[in-house]
């Protein structure tokens, strides 16, 4: 798995061969070490070039081996191989095309020179796998770039483009031509020259003033980036080692830190996320249609109907994916404003034209309706689109919860109607829920999934039900948060618990950000509040179950969140972002409790987490049972990429498996006993069956789910 050949009489070219990303599997490591030894001992060889076969240099260690200690242990270790490379008495040049990531870049850092193609990118993304660059990267990179630049790359894990890498001094030269040929020529020119100074292990780290203060601040910053995640903190510690210890001592520290991370639940969860992200693309339907057999008609033109915040973001996302887009808004003043906003986001026209007439959608391959959440309005638009649009055009709605099938019924082409549930801001957020109704054709799903990929989204195929997967599961989570306020908690307490768990924002801050009026409108539509509710109905009960009117009361007070400068928190002015505690809210909650005879009790963070998260997870099991999501992995992808679930906790279903299904069941039983009027706390039958069948690992849950009707 490492090809070895001699070119130009004296250059050994070692080529890593392990498609698709030339990962450093046990076989590659074996081949690499043998090749390095062969080059060292062959008197005819005077220099060495290391490259990747067929394009990419190397995507790093083989992540598939990480869960399997015997694979990881077999073959030589990366550290040993890289030491041999660095120690070689002949110049070694890395020829980097495509990407050099993780162990791939660590290999390049062990080489004496680094040549890059101008379109290559390099990085140490281990942190997003819950790890640190554990094969010398945390010690060599600071010696090359200095602590600041190295720490930034290691803690963020970002990919650095070749141009920037050249400026940083990470790459020695760039070429637009054949990188291997250029590296071979250079290697020959370096034959016989001294190498001591080129060995990063020999170099001291460039000095840094106020080391203690610098690393204190770096730790605070790393903690803030991903709350509760261990890897960023370990990265900072390792780089501090590089700045303060001799190379070999630093390597020992790196090894100790890596050993702790490698076996941690967080690394396991992050790795799981890596594969769920990619696995979501492999969709299937109950009719047997599959991602790899179903042909999708390509989409090259699109129309977006409605240019509010969502419509603008969707327009930008489609235009950036290279589609020609017509953006339609029937209200003229809104159209002008939207045009300016979209142009700003696209930094120019970007293939978008504008119209106030729905007829402009006539020639589009795909239409995305993004008007506000009102079924009657959407039905009318779909009726019109059905006659305006060309045959074969796909008609999508960006609704976040309404019935796709009802909209399909307004058209003469129900098999071409689907939901494309984007998340705000639509041009930034990675998640796309691709929602099929019972009549949506597999070709329609295939086209949407392909388009999602073009837009750089994590697209997940889901079935049609109120709220689909993400918002359906969010409902019980929100509901428990409201109940906790009624029982004595404050928004600050609930948010602190969730943020400590790792969410970037607690539920109440999130609600202030997205606007309390959105949920209010949905509840009105569902008949839970508003004019349809008669005065004789108890305020805290709906349809025989506990109901909290807190959100409705807040909206009646005009507290919509950030946009009004007041919500669950107080803001300096409408649109401001910094949330402050609001004494008004405290009195409001006290009066509310008194009015309803509720006794405030002490609530701890554990109860907050268990009530909110277990209720959400329980609904996740119901989603699986109902066949609305194809797998627990798909649910987790939705939560990690659309709802801020911390990656180092894998997603709600993975988290349930990690906590232990029996413990989740026990928790739900306990809370349901205490709150029998809250059906979301009643453990669902799939969870019970999984526990009864011995809590199988997550990849085997589908065997227990089997037999249920798929909605996909
Ligand atoms: C003592 C030291 C011990 C351990 C040291 C560890 C250091 C490391 O190197 S950790 C790994 C660091 N590398 C990465 O994090 C890179 C991860 N990969 C990517 O970011 C991307 O895959 C990519 C390399 C940029 C390529 O992207 P793209 O072209 O979009 O293809 P994908 O769909 O992402 O991937 C294709 C295919 O390859 C699989 N794959 C990718 N990287 C790895 C890998 N490092 N190991 C194993 N497999 C990998 C990926 O899963 C895809 O396969 P599927 O079957 O579709 O899942």
Image (spheres, helix red, strand yellow):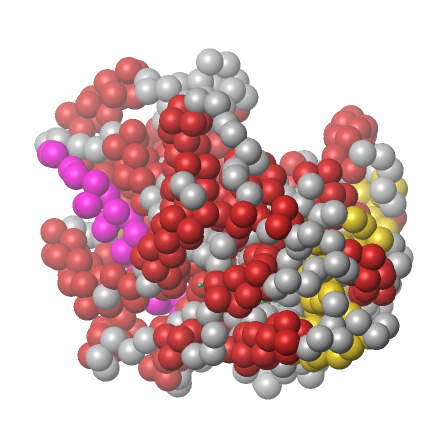
Q: How many callouts does the rendering have? A: 0
Q: 548 or 14, which lies in front?
A: 14
Q: Is residue 309 left or right of residue 570?
A: right
**Left or right of 70: which side holds 711?**
right
Near-viewer residue (535 or 470) = 470
The answer to which of 566 and 657 lies nearer the viewer is: 657
Query: What's the magenta bit mostly, secondary-structure-wise?
Result: helix
In this picture, is 134 found above or below 45?
above
Residue at the image position 13 percent from the left and 31 percent from the top: 600
Which quadrant does ligand 1 occupy? Answer: bottom right
Q: Position of residue 2 (x, y in %)?
A: 65, 78
Q: Tell me where the magenta segment starts and ends, as one range.
A: 601-624
Question: Would you identify the image quadrant in which residue 509 lies?
Answer: top left
Q: Is residue 607 magenta?
A: yes
Location of the C terminus (image quadrant):
bottom right
Locate residue 357, reporting x and y percent. 85, 42
In which quarter of the view is residue 246 placed?
top left
Name the residue: 37% across, 75% down.
69
Image point (86%, 72%), residue name:
8
Q: Is residue 279 visible?
A: no
Q: Residue, x 41% and y 47% (percent of image)?
A: 250
> Which quadrant is home to the N terminus?
bottom right
Q: Is residue 8 above or below residue 539?
A: below
Verify whether residue 117 appears in magenta. no
Q: Would you say residue 600 is visible in this rendering?
A: yes
């Amino acid at each position: 798995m490492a090809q070895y050949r001699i070119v130009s009489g004296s250059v050994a070219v070692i080529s890593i061969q392990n498609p698709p990303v030339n990962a450093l599997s046990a076989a590659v490591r074996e081949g690499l070490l043998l090749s390095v030894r062969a080059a060292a001992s062959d008197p005819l060889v005077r220099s060495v070039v290391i490259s990747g076969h067929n394009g990419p240099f190397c995507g790093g260690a083989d992540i598939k081996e990480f869960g399997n200690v015997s694979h990881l242990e077999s073959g030589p270790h990366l550290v040993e191989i890289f030491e041999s490379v660095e120690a070689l008495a002949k110049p070694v040049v890395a020829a980097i095309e495509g990407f050099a990531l993780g162990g791939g870049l660590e290999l390049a850092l062990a080489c004496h020179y680094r040549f890059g193609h101008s379109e290559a990118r390099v990085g140490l993304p281990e942190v997003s796998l819950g790890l640190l660059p554990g094969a010398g990267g945390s010690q060599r990179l600071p010696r090359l770039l200095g602590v600041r630049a190295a720490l930034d790359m290691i803690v963020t894990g970002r990919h650095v483009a070749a141009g920037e890498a050249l400026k940083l001094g990470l790459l020695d030269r760039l070429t637009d031509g054949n990188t291997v040929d250029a590296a071979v020529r250079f290697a020959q020119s370096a034959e016989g020259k001294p190498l001591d100074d080129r060995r990063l292990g020999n170099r001291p780290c460039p000095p840094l003033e106020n080391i203690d203060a610098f690393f204190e601040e770096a730790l605070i910053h790393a903690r803030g980036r991903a709350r509760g995640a261990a890897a960023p903190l370990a990265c900072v510690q390792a780089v501090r080692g590089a700045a303060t210890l001799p190379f070999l001592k630093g390597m020992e520290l790196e090894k100790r830190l890596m050993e702790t991370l490698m076996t941690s639940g967080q690394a396991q969860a992050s790795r799981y996320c890596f594969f769920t992200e990619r696995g979501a693309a492999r969709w299937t339907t109950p009719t047997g249609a599959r991602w790899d057999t179903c042909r999708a008609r390509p989409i090259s033109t699109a129309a977006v109907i409605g240019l509010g915040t969502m419509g603008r973001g969707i327009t930008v996302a489609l235009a950036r994916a290279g589609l020609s887009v017509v953006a339609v808004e029937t209200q003229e003043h809104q159209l002008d404003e939207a045009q300016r906003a979209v142009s700003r986001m696209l930094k120019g026209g970007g293939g978008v034209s504008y119209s106030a007439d729905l007829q402009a959608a006539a020639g589009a391959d795909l239409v995305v309706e993004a008007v506000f959440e009102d079924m009657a309005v959407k039905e009318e638009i779909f009726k019109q689109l059905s006659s305006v649009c060309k045959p074969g055009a796909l008609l999508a709605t960006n609704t976040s919860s309404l019935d796709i099938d009802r909209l399909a019924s307004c058209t003469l082409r129900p098999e071409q109607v689907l939901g494309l549930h984007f998340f705000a801001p639509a041009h930034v957020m990675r998640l796309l829920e691709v929602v099929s109704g019972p009549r949506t054709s597999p070709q329609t799903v295939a086209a949407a999934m392909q388009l999602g990929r073009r837009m750089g989204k994590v697209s997940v195929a889901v079935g049609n039900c109120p709220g689909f997967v993400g918002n359906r599961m969010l409902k019980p989570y929100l509901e428990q948060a409201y109940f906790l306020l009624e029982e004595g908690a404050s928004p600050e307490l609930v948010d602190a618990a969730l943020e400590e768990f790792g969410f970037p924002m607690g539920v109440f801050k999130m609600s202030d950000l997205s606007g309390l009026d959105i949920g209010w409108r949905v509840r009105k539509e569902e008949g839970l509040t508003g004019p349809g509710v008669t005065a004789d109905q108890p305020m805290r009960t709906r349809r025989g179950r506990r109901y909290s009117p807190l959100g409705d009361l807040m909206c009646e007070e005009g507290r919509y969140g950030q946009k009004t400068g007041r919500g669950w928190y107080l803001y300096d002015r409408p649109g401001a972002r910094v949330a402050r505690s609001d004494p008004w809210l405290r009195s409001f909650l006290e009066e509310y409790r008194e009015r309803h005879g509720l006794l405030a009790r002490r609530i701890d963070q554990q109860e907050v987490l268990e009530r909110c998260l277990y209720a959400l997870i329980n609904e996740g099991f119901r989603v699986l049972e109902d066949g609305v999501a194809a797998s627990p992995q798909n649910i987790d992808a939705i939560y990690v990429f659309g709802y801020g679930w911390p990656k180092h906790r894998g997603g709600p279903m993975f988290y349930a498996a990690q906590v232990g299904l029996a413990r989740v069941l026990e928790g739900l039983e306990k809370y349901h006993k205490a709150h029998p009027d809250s059906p979301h706390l009643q453990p669902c039958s799939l969870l019970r069956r999984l526990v009864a069948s011995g809590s199988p690992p997550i990849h085997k849950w589908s065997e227990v789910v089997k037999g249920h009707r798929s909605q996909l």
